[in-house]
Image (spheres, helix red, strand yellow):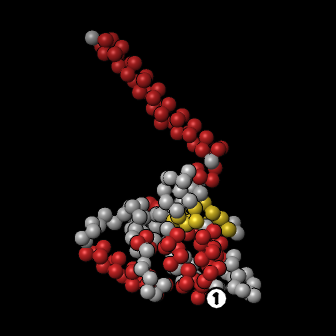
């Protein structure tokens, strides 16, 4: 009886150990190695460095609070853009908390372009709370404010936005969008007419 149980358990234990090693160690290590070899930037979070310091990621949104920069859409991830708490607010369209927050965000955004309708993505959070992109309309909406603060022609700021519009993948997947970090980095390199480079 004891030998029968042992002989029946041995293959199950061997297969469990084999698949644990194969799928729990070998497979993840192989994928990590392939990712680091073929796509090292993406495998490490698509981080952007400047002066030896990481300043952000092209795939993870961050808050820009200064009026000198294009602002991102609101985030409900943790206290805002918390990669460890990626999520939406889960508020329904009838939630008073959501209505109050959106009204406050609309009021804060209106001075950027008085008399113009505020684009929805400037006042609504994405499902992940970490969206790094804006619609071209939402970026262009902020051009007047940025031009005024930075003493730039508004046409120059609008042209910068249009230069950074990324089209849908293969022309059909997704929508036109602007990466806010890339746009703000380019903005820091634009000088007012007749003035040296701004920072």
Q: Is residue 77 left or right of residue 66?
A: left
Residue at position x 52%, y 79% from top? 142
Viewer-side residue, 186 vs 40: 186
Residue drawn at point x = 54 percent, y = 34 percent: 26
Q: Which residue is mark 1?
A: 151
Percent position of residue 113, x then y: 48, 84
Of residues 12 and 109, which is closer to you in this image?
A: 109
Q: Residue at x 39, y 18 (%)?
A: 10
The reply to whether residue 91 is in sight is: yes
Secondary structure category for the residue under label 1: loop
| Badge count | 1
Residue at image location 70% in from the left, 69% down from the top: 51
Q: Residue 18, image x and y in percent?
A: 47, 26
Where on the picture, by quarter, is residue 85? Answer: bottom left
Q: Position of residue 185 (x, y in %)?
A: 64, 72
Q: Nearer the viewer, residue 14 or 172?
A: 172
Closest to the observer, 11 or 49: 49
Height in image: 182 above or below 115?
A: above
When asked about the image quadrant of residue 188, the answer is: bottom right
């Amino acid at each position: 009886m004891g030998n029968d149980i042992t002989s029946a358990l041995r293959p199950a234990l061997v297969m469990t150990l084999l698949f644990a090693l194969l799928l729990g160690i070998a497979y993840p290590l192989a994928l990590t190695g392939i990712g680091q070899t073929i796509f090292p930037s993406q495998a490490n979070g698509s981080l952007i460095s400047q002066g030896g310091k990481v300043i952000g990621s092209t795939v993870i949104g961050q808050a820009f609070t200064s009026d000198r920069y294009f602002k991102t859409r609101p985030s409900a991830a943790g206290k805002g853009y918390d990669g460890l708490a990626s999520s939406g607010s889960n508020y329904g369209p009838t939630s008073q908390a959501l209505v109050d927050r959106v009204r406050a965000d609309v009021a804060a955004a209106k001075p950027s372009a008085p008399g113009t309708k505020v684009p929805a993505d400037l006042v609504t959070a994405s499902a992940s709370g970490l969206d790094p992109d804006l619609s071209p309309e939402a970026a262009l909406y902020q051009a007047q404010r940025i031009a005024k603060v930075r003493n730039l022609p508004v046409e120059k700021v609008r042209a910068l936005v249009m230069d950074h519009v990324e089209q849908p993948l293969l022309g059909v997947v997704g929508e036109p969008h602007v990466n806010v970090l890339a746009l703000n980095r380019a903005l820091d390199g634009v000088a007012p007419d007749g003035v040296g480079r701004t920072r």
